Amino acid sequence: MGQIFSGMFSKLWGINKEIRILILGLDGAGKTTILYRLQLGEVIKTKPTIGFNVETLSYKNLKLNVWDLGGQTSIRPYWRCYYSNTAAVIFVVDSTDKDRVETASKELHLMLREEELQESALLVFANKQDQPGAMTAAEVSKSLNLTELKDRSWSIVASSAIKGEGLTEGLDWLIDVIKDEQLS
Ligand SMILES: Nc1nc2c(ncn2[C@@H]2O[C@H](COP(=O)(O)OP(=O)(O)OP(=O)(O)O)[C@@H](O)[C@H]2O)c(=O)[nH]1
Ligand SMILES: [Mg+2]
């Protein structure tokens, strides 16, 4: 009985359940900085990611397996190798990079068309808000055509990985969505 109860409890609250999250976005957007800011609570010096970084974050009783993939043009075709069993995608945008926001939008919509990601929630970070002239989250949202997204839980949050702003707010939203979807 104790075991059955603890099994139900684990299912309800997701304890010990591994949850796979991908961090995607163009090169230089701040993906690796965000991953380690969330894991270590500090800003690390990064190099462009060739391949991926993967870390386990324990967050609100959940074990998150977070994959941070390199965003350079030549590496993007490999993103799809990581799509299966993905609960959520965190898509990071450099809000100062107005020249490439259209490219970011194309990559985002290409990725979201993939069959394996149809059930995945989407959190967009409009990152680098500490920089002067950064596009607001509303401007990034418009450039990415986020309102076109149907049948998907999505949200956009203004963030600064350097200052540590917006990150836990975004992750809290994501965790609530993932918990809701597990229970439904
Ligand atoms: N000002 C500012 N700089 C940031 C922020 N987030 C990341 N950066 C800087 O942006 C640069 C690129 O950050 P990375 O985290 O390496 O970017 P990435 O998305 O992992 O890039 P790839 O691995 O090439 O795909 C680094 O110099 C970071 O310090 C931010 O919120 N504000
Ligand atoms: Mg990186």
Image (cartoon, helix red, strand yellow):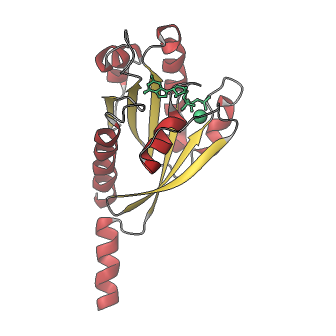
The answer to whether 110 is drawn above or below residue 145 in the figure is below
Q: Which residue is depicted at the point 34% across and 44% down?
A: 171
Q: Which residue is depicted at the point 38% across and 36% down?
A: 123
Q: Which corner quadrant of the image does residue 142 belong to?
A: top left
The answer to whether 3 is drawn above or below residue 175 in the figure is below
Residue 174 visible from this viewpoint:
yes
Q: Is 48 left, or right, of 142 in this rendering?
A: right
The answer to whether 86 is drawn above or below residue 76 in the figure is below
Q: Position of residue 172 (x, y in %)?
A: 29, 46
The C terminus - image quarter: bottom left
Foreground: 99 or 81?
A: 99
Q: Which residue is depicted at the point 34% across and 70% down?
A: 11
The N terminus - image quarter: bottom left
Residue 118 visible from this viewpoint:
no
Q: Position of residue 133 (x, y in %)?
A: 37, 9
Foreground: 44 or 176?
A: 44
Q: Position of residue 59 (x, y in %)?
A: 36, 56
Q: Which corner quadrant of the image does residue 71 belong to?
A: top right
Q: Position of residue 156 (x, y in %)?
A: 33, 29
